[in-house]
Image (cartoon, coloured by chain):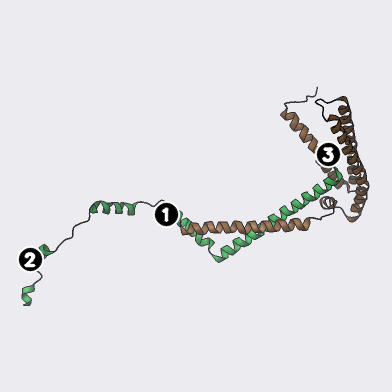
Amino acid sequence: MNRSLVILLGTLALAMVVFGGSYAMSRHVGERCLTQPGNDLAWLRQEFHLNDAEMARVQKLHEGYLPQCAAMCQKIAAKKMEVEVALNGTTSVNPIAKQKLAELSALRAQCQAQMLQHFTEVSQTMPPEQGRRYLAEMQRLTLGLHEQTEQSMSGSMGHEHHQP
Amino acid sequence: MKEDLNPTDAKLGMLLRAARVSPALPPRFQENVWRRIEDAEAPVPSASGLSWLDALAALVLRPRFALATVTLLIVAGALLGVRDGGQIARQDAQARYLAVVAPDSLR
């Protein structure tokens, strides 16, 4: 093989190694430096530029919300078990299973409403612009996935809901 | 005696030429000569490519150029790495917050 070609290929390989090594090391260091393990609210402070007073208010709301959320999650888990029991061994959706599913949906809706209420309260502790951004972001993250799923399902099934 | 060895003597010259032994030509001598002439005159297609590669190879081997390139690569890699690392950390923090306030069954 031509000597110049060998030199150029070797240089290219070396350049890739140098760039890749620098990138990988910096990414690892950057990730480690900016991660705050054990602090669930770190994202709020970083993303919405909250000061200590605002963070203290958010922290208080957060601590008040967590037990409510946990209780609701337990209720939902128990209701899911009831649905599974009602569906167990049957080949059709019986009236009891339908009732349990409706109750599960109601619990989820209640939990969702409670969650959105919490987001609203948190947004009110922030500066107005940041609060609006937080609320929009949380609604997008928590409710947007349902919309995407519904849209993809309606698209794939060929359904279209036309307004009269 | 010296008068007898006159170089302009025509008879002597003819005798000398007749006495010179000319070696036999190798087989297909003429054909090979023409082929070599044609090869020498034909343009070499990769000649310009080779010179371009040579010039580039010479450039990358220059210490100043090599140092500048390595520095640039390290700085570019570091900047991109820090940016991506920050983005990953941000996404992790967001996922952690969401996991606490919005259970999976609601999303």
Q: Which residue is mark 2?
A: B10
Q: Residues within 10 Å of mark 3 (few under 14, many from 20)?
A: few
Amino acid type shown at disc 1: Ala
Residue at the spot 50% in from the left edge and 58% down from the top edge: A6
Q: For label 1, count other residues whose C-alpha is less than 10 Å away and answer few (under 14), some (14-19) or many (20+).
A: few
Comparing labels 1 and 2, the label whose residue is closer to the camera: 1
**Crowding at label 2, few (<14), some or many (≥20) Cα neighbours within 10 Å?**
few
Residue that carries the numbered disc 1 in the rendered image: B47
Image height of B23 relative to A125, above or below: below
Instruction: Please say whether residue B12 is visible from this viewpoint.
Output: yes
Colour chain A appears in? brown
Q: Is residue A112 visible?
A: no
Image check: A27 left or right of B100? left
Whichever of labels 1 and 2 marks the residue nearer the N terminus, that label is: 2
Q: Position of residue B83 (x, y in %)?
A: 72, 54
Secondary element at image label 1: helix
In the displayed orientation, state which residue is furthest to the top.
A164
**Dot 1: chain letter:** B
Amino acid type at mark 3 = Ser
Residue toward you, A74 or B91: A74
Q: Which mark is residue B105?
A: 3
At 50% across and 62% down in the image, what residue appears?
B58
From the image, state the color of chain B: green
Residue B60 image point, x, y percent = 54, 61
Q: CA distance from mark 1 to mark 2?
A: 54 Å
**Could you tell me which chain the residue with mark 2 belongs to?**
B
Give the quadrant of residue B14. bottom left
User: Please, is residue A65 above or below residue B33 in the view?
Assistant: above
